[in-house]
Image: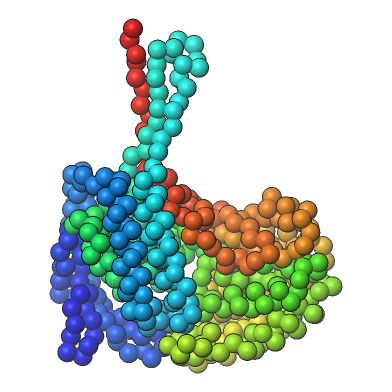
Amino acid sequence: MEGTKANVQHYRLYINGRWVETGETIPVTHKYTGEVIASIAKARREHVEAAVTHAQEVFRESGLTPFQRYEILLRASRIAEKRREELELSLVREVGKTVKDAKGELDRVVNTLRLCAEEAKRITGEMVPLHATPGAENRFGFAIRVPKGVIGAITPFNYPLLLSTHKVAPAIAAGNTVVLKPATATPIASFQLVEILEEAGLPKGHINIVTGSGSQVGDWMLDDRRIAMYTFTGSSEVGAYIKQRSGLRPVSLELGNNSPNIVHADADLEQAARIISQRSFHNAGQACIAVQRILVQESAVDEFTEKYLSLVRELKVGNPEEPDTDVGPMISESEADRAENWVQEAVAQGAELLHGGKREGALFHPTVLSNTTPEMKVNCLEVFAPVVTIIPYRTIDEAFAVANQSAYGLQAGIFTHDLNIAMRAARELEYGGVIINDVSTYRNDVMPYGGVKSSGLGKEGPRYAIEEMTELRMVVMNLNK
């Protein structure tokens, strides 16, 4: 990284421990003001190939022990904590996050680094009872976990520091090397993570960063057969493309959703309205587990809606650098325009606009719709904006059917005091995570996180990501007498 006369930071590629200039740059903007706050080097194919070459060479030669990996990641967590204010402000500016959301992301980054450090010491195999089969009485068997090799990590714009950490830290903990491609709109966080790991003592070549468009740099990564595994967070369409292009190589895909959140009449409606209103519009709705569809039992829908709207009306929309702002800008004006068009289309088709629908550049005000139908984009697709729909239902069977009427299946929330309904939800809702008496947006970084259907393959979370990033190798010994 280096500064310029205009105080605009410039970030070069990071390959084999060296900062590499390319001759072409891409601007990075402040998502609220629109001013250029940084520039990044634009990679060419030869840079991607060099990054993979060095990552592969280092993987084959690295002598980092599990304890050394633990020490590096633990130091990284402490460095991230020390740089907290700087990192938070950077997220506010390059992503458009509110101060509140940026603080939450930093908390999770520090915790995820710690968790991955601990998991580096816990990678184990298992004994296999070969002698339990006839003719194998003299055989001794065990399976060990070994790293896959070079991990290709592609991260999105919405949680750039956290999701880079969720891919890079488990890969390092497992003994792999990494080639990281961050989102072009929000790359600064990934460069900062590299700086933190470098300061923490990670030897050169273990992490490499290349930047540029997904259609170019991402494709060059997919073309390189030396990458042993891909881990990606983003849209279902791009995830399907990566899976198709990756061939027999494994992929971990954390994709889209249109999260249902069920509010049954027996729930504490005050609590449900408060929690859902607080979490409906965080990160301007740009989270794959963001609240999108609120399903409320008919007998409670009027009371819930009144309580919910009274809280939503109190949310402050505006400059994300002001500490009391609740909802900041979306990632771009074009994305806010898309959200506005989807809302207007729904209203034209008969939906009722209960609140919001207002756009000011990249700012899109919290929006609540009712009287929607399943085929409307705001219901059947991932809106990825501060837009929710309130949908009444009669019976819990109907609620489960509507919730499952989706191509997606990442996480769902349900509010109820009925243990039987809660347990049925755990079994019947077709989602990777079912959150009871809380919203779909709940994620603890230690838990297995990932979806079904078009929401992806594989699991994140330190222990579970490490399992994805290692191979179970069987070892058989013939004990001759």
For residue 226, say whether it is visible.
Answer: no
Along the viewing direction, whichever of 84 and 403 lies nearer the viewer: 84
Q: Where is residue 9 in the image (x, y as percent from the top left)?
A: 23, 81
Along the viewing direction, whichever of 199 and 370 lies nearer the viewer: 199
Classify the position of the C terminus by image quarter: top left
Displayed quadrant of residue 181: bottom left
Residue at the far top in the pictured view = 481
Q: Name which residue lies at 63% across and 89% down.
A: 314
Q: In the image, is residue 152 above or below residue 260?
A: above
Q: How is the image coloured?
A: rainbow
Q: In the image, is residue 449 above or below residue 292?
A: above
Q: Name which residue lies at 47% across and 22% down.
A: 129
Q: In the image, is residue 31 above or below residue 124?
A: below
Along the viewing direction, whichever of 309 and 410 lies nearer the viewer: 309
Q: Where is residue 295 in the image (x, y as percent from the top left)?
A: 72, 69
| Horizontal side of residue 176 vs 60, given as left or right | right
Q: Where is residue 226 in the image (x, y as percent from the top left)?
A: 26, 47
Q: Name which residue lies at 79% across and 59% down.
A: 418
Q: Name which residue lies at 32% across and 57% down.
A: 73
Residue at the far right in the pictured view = 299
Classify the position of the N terminus by image quarter: bottom left
| Horizontal side of residue 341 vs 418, given as left or right | left
